[in-house]
Image (spheres, helix red, strand yellow):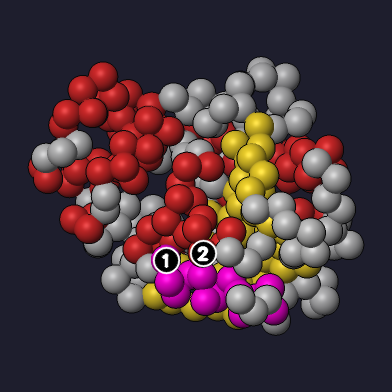
Amino acid sequence: MILHSTLRSSETGREVILLIHGMGSASTAWKPILEDLEAVFTVVTVDLPGHGFTPMDERQPMDPKALAYSVLETMRSLGFDSFHVVGNSLGGWVALEMAAMTPSAIRSVTGLAPAGLWLKPFVARSPSTAIARILPGSLRVVSLRLLHYEWARKIGFENVSPKWREFSYELCLDATNAMATAAGYYPAWDALLKKRFDQNVSTSIPVTVIFGDADKTLPASTCQERSLVPPHTNWLILEECGHAPMWDHPKEVIEQILQTTGTHP
């Protein structure tokens, strides 16, 4: 399946970097770091099936390996055979699967709170799953107005980040709309049940994993198993940071992406 993609800053000779969002999100999630990345790379963003502008196809498998194949197919359709990858949450898991699946195509991986790093896989949706999906849907009709109020942003984002008060109206609106319209949310959840990331990644591929110290979505106690990533992984914990490090600490994330890719502005 070819995914909806957007190509940005395609100057000749630049390194190519691909950004993959998380479950219930969309390519709009990358806005806080896009401008800085576009100054250095040719940037490609994709919307996973049933997310953003990519429609949900009931025939499309939604497990991370199948999504990795679809992303690789999409990049090939754009003419890119080798590139760096940054992924958040489910997108981070997909990025790792891509590196294991086709190491010749992946120049580096930066996983921002990547999913799949648990010893004991989920066997059922977590109770918070339905709330996370239903709430944005119920708020969407009035979100243009309500998200101007702190209490509404608190309801939607307090569990996502300790820095939710600093989030812009645009960021909150984009995230609310993305979740509310994510037809692929439940299919993606169901497809990762009883699974974890368990593949080998070549030592030739630089890997950085970044988690926040306040990640309530994938907490350290159950979802941050270091033995599942390559031994050469650069593993970092950011303070006062939740499940979307590119929202909470965009400058630090940019710095780590540049280091991992070996690219200098």
Within the magenta stretch, is there residue 251?
Answer: yes
Q: Between residues 118 and 183, which one lies in front from this camera angle?
A: 183
- Marker disc for residue 36: 2
| 190 sits left or right of 14 in the view | left
Which residue position is annotated with label 1?
Answer: 250
Residue at figure coordinates x 70%, y 40% from the top left: 67
Closest to the observer, 157 or 6: 6
Q: Residue at x 73, y 57 (%)?
A: 11
Return the x and y of residue 122 as percentages of the image width and height. 52, 46
Q: Secondary structure at mark 1?
A: helix
Q: Secondary structure at mark 2?
A: helix
Whether the residues at callouts 2 and 1 have beta carbons within 8 Å, the answer is yes
Q: CA distance from mark 2 to mark 1?
A: 9 Å
Vertical order, 37 against 7 (above or below)? below
> Where does residue 110 sit, x and y in percent of width and height?
61, 66
Q: Position of residue 256 (x, y in %)?
A: 55, 75
Looking at the rendering, the stretch of residues picked out in magenta corresponds to 250-262
The x and y percentages for residue 242 are 35, 61
Q: Residue furthest front?
A: 11
Q: Quadrant of residue 84?
A: bottom right
